[in-house]
Image (cartoon, rainbow, N blue to C red):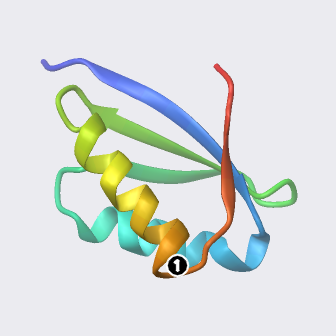
């Protein structure tokens, strides 16, 4: 079994579905779950070795798609 990293993000509730769709459309990059829909917190489970690719996708989400989010600590 491979290792993984858990990352959490907060964003506008209206952006959750689009954020998750884009993340999961990149097969094997990460799985996304809504942790708290009221607080708009999404958790990503990122397999080891996919962190750099995920960061590139996150930058595209910020820049090209205009989705604003911030990573939560821990």
Closest to the observer, 36 or 51: 51
Say which quarter of the image contains residue 27.
bottom left
Say which quarter of the image contains residue 59.
bottom left
Residue 30 can be seen, yes or no:
no
- Whether residue 17 sits left or right of residue 29 in the image: it is right
Residue in the picture at 21% in, 26% down: 48
Residue in the picture at 32% in, 54% down: 56
- Whether residue 73 sits left or right of residue 54 in the image: it is right
Q: Is residue 28 above or below residue 48?
A: below
- Whether residue 34 sits left or right of residue 29 in the image: it is right
Closest to the observer, 34 or 51: 51
Residue in the picture at 34% in, 60% down: 57
Q: Which residue is mark 1?
A: 18
Spot the residue most to the left. 1
Marker count (numbered): 1
Residue 13 can be seen, yes or no:
yes
Q: Position of residue 1 (x, y in %)?
A: 12, 18
Classify mark 1: helix, strand or loop: helix
In which quadrant is the C terminus drawn? Answer: top right
Q: Is residue 57 above or below residue 1?
A: below
Q: Position of residue 21 (x, y in %)?
A: 42, 74
């Amino acid at each position: 079994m491979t290792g993984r990293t858990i990352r959490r993000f907060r964003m506008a509730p209206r952006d959750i579905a689009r954020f998750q769709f884009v993340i999961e459309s990149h097969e094997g990059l990460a799985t996304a779950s809504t942790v708290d829909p009221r607080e708009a917190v999404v958790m990503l489970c990122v397999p080891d070795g996919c962190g750099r690719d995920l960061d590139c996708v996150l930058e595209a989400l910020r820049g090209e798609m205009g989705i604003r989010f911030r990573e939560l600590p821990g």
